[in-house]
């Protein structure tokens, strides 16, 4: 049974999509496309959802906020994007605050695609 998983697709050396697998399903699949490499990474556990399972939030946006479900908090995560500054490309990244419910990183210059990922788990938020 899938506990959590992620699907990343790339083309010509660039990530073009990122998606998550549905917990509780026996499989996690993606489609095959010409000139696109697909990577599926999953954590499986027996035939039921483990009570402390982890949910994944992911996106490829550079102005984005990712949120955990109600009653969950971030146990790990990061937000990042590439920007152009004076003709040079720079990567801006930050870690998400542990146990918070959401994480965001706003673009303030000429930004390109970002990669954002959070892992959420049921916790008591303080």
Image (spheres, grey):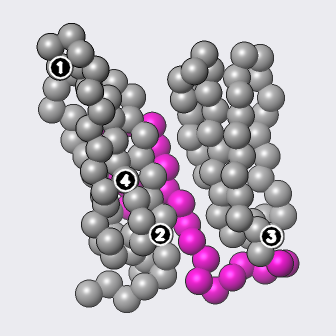
> Earlier along the polypeptide chain: callout 1 or callout 3?
3
User: Would residue 15 be counted in the magenta stretch?
Assistant: no
Q: Position of residue 108 (x, y in %)?
A: 15, 32
Is 65 above or below relative to 72? above
Look at the numbered discs 1 and 3 and tell me whether their residues touch, using CB distance below 8 Å. no
Residue at the (42%, 65%) spot, across then down: 76
Give the numbered dot on residue 120: 2
> Earlier along the polypeptide chain: callout 3 or callout 4?
3
Residue located beneath label 4 in the image? 78
Is 44 above or below relative to 114? below
Q: Position of residue 64 (x, y in %)?
A: 33, 44
Question: Please, what secondary structure does the residue beneath circle 1 have?
Answer: strand
User: Rounded to the nearest whole Å, what is the CA distance between mark 2 and mark 1?
Assistant: 33 Å
User: Rounded to the nearest whole Å, what is the CA distance between mark 3 and mark 4?
Assistant: 26 Å
Residue at the (64%, 86%) spot, across then down: 51
Question: Please, what secondary structure does the residue beneath circle 4 have?
Answer: strand
Q: Position of residue 85 (x, y in %)?
A: 17, 19
Mark in front: 2 vs 1: 1
Residue located beneath label 1 in the image? 85
> Earlier along the polypeptide chain: callout 1 or callout 4?
4
Residue at the (69%, 69%) spot, across then down: 3
> Earlier along the polypeptide chain: callout 2 or callout 4?
4
Mark in front: 1 vs 3: 1
- Which range of residues does the magenta coloring cover? 46-69
Say few, some or many: other residues with alpha carbon within 10 Å of mark 1 (under 14 / 14 to 19 / 20 or more).
few
> Earlier along the polypeptide chain: callout 2 or callout 1?
1
Say few, some or many: other residues with alpha carbon within 10 Å of mark 2 (under 14 / 14 to 19 / 20 or more).
many
Residue extending farthest to the top is 87
Question: Please, what secondary structure does the residue beneath circle 2 have?
Answer: strand
User: Rounded to the nearest whole Å, what is the CA distance between mark 1 and mark 3?
Assistant: 45 Å
Give the numbered dot on residue 1: 3
* Quadrant assignment, res 103: bottom left
């Amino acid at each position: 049974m899938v506990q959590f998983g992620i699907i990343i697709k790339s083309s010509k050396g660039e990530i073009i999509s990122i998606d998550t697998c549905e917990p509780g399903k026996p499989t996690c699949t993606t489609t095959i496309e010409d000139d696109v490499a697909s990577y599926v990474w999953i954590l499986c556990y027996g035939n039921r959802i483990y009570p402390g399972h982890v949910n994944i939030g992911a996106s490829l946006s550079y102005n984005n906020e990712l949120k955990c479900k109600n009653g969950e908090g971030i146990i790990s995560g990061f937000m990042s994007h590439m920007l152009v500054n004076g003709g040079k490309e720079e990567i801006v990244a930050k870690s998400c605050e542990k146990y918070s419910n959401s994480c965001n990183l706003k673009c303030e210059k000429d930004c390109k695609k970002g990669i954002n990922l959070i892992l959420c788990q049921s916790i008591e938020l303080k």
